[in-house]
């Protein structure tokens, strides 16, 4: 393979360690009934904690839960958090809003996939809300191109249709809360695109390398694309999903 850099227009940001780290699974052997606070899991008002472990007292890893930090009572399971890879509490990262009314949780769904979910905390319950996806807002032309070519996301197979765009890495995480209702989210993904040069669709948020196959004409050239961006977003109010008034930058 002969690799040549055909375009560089990157937006620098802190790389997601959860995505780039392909290390072994982070495991912890929980005792019956043991619950441990995840990374940054305590809410700013000290009323809640996000914990991982075994609330059923059977031993082993049961999932991730919202807990009353004062009464030490489990209030409910956070079922949308990805828990199928890691079990250790430090493998899960919470991002609380300053007023403790929203929390984002990042964890690995697969070795190269860091998933981010957001909950609204109300009446001592956690309500899952829409999580932002920057790719199709920052570079909609590239998003449309991958759909046109036929794409497979992480963990998906191409199926019966031709698949010329494949996502090999994905990561999303809240970087910081700007206020009680607004936050910055970062996204980092990698794609492999065949037959079509995606450079004109990438704007200022991605870089692409062309890989030319010099051994046979039967295999298409392909392009490795890395997307990196940050975007501002407004947290949802009661009865609403996440606002779409954020901007990739």
Image: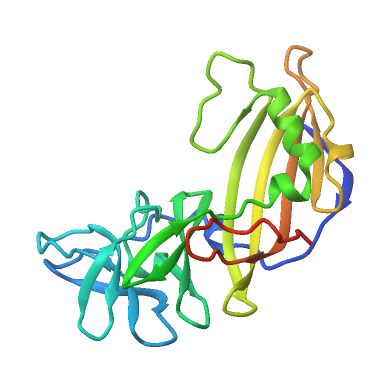
Q: Residue at x 73, y 49 (%)?
A: 137
Residue 84, compared with residue 34, is above or below; it is above
Going by the image, does 232 lie left or right of 88? right
Furthest-front residue in this view: 239
Whole-percent x, y for residue 8 in the image: 87, 51
Quarter of the image where the N terminus is located: top right
How many marks overall? 0
Q: Residue at x 31, y 73 (%)?
A: 124
Whole-percent x, y for residue 209 in the image: 81, 41
Q: Nearer the viewer, residue 131 or 158?
A: 131
Whole-percent x, y for residue 3 in the image: 81, 38
Q: Which of 167 and 63 is in front in this view?
A: 63
Going by the image, does 211 lie left or right of 24? right
Quarter of the image where the C terminus is located: bottom right
Q: Quadrant of residue 91?
A: bottom left
Q: Which residue is drawn at 59% across and 45% down?
A: 169
Q: Quadrant of residue 70?
A: bottom left
Whole-percent x, y for residue 16 in the image: 60, 62
Q: Residue at x 62, y 71 (%)?
A: 183
Give the colour scheme of this rendering.
rainbow
């Amino acid at each position: 393979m002969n690799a040549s850099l055909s375009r560089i227009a990157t937006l620098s940001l802190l790389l997601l360690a959860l995505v780039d780290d392909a290390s072994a699974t982070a495991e912890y052997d929980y005792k019956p009934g043991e619950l441990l606070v995840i990374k940054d899991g305590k809410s700013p008002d000290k009323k809640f904690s996000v914990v991982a472990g075994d609330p059923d007292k059977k031993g082993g890893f049961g999932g991730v839960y919202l807990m009353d930090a004062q009464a030490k009572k489990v209030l409910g399971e956070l079922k949308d958090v990805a828990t199928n890879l890691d079990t250790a509490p430090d493998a899960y990262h919470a991002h609380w809003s300053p007023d403790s009314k929203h929390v984002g949780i990042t964890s690995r769904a697969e070795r190269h996939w860091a998933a981010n979910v957001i909950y609204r905390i109300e009446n001592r319950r956690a309500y899952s809300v829409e999580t932002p996806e920057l790719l199709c807002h920052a570079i909609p032309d590239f998003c449309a191109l991958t759909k046109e070519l036929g794409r497979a996301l992480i963990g998906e197979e191409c199926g019966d249709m031709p698949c010329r765009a494949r996502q090999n890495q994905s990561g999303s995480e809240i970087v910081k809360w700007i206020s009680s209702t607004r936050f910055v989210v970062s996204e980092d993904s990698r794609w492999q695109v065949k037959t079509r040069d995606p450079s004109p669709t990438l704007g200022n948020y991605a870089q692409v390398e062309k890989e030319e196959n010099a051994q046979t004409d039967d295999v298409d050239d392909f392009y490795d694309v890395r997307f990196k961006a940050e975007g501002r977003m407004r947290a949802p109010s009661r009865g609403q999903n996440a606002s779409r008034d954020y901007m990739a930058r």
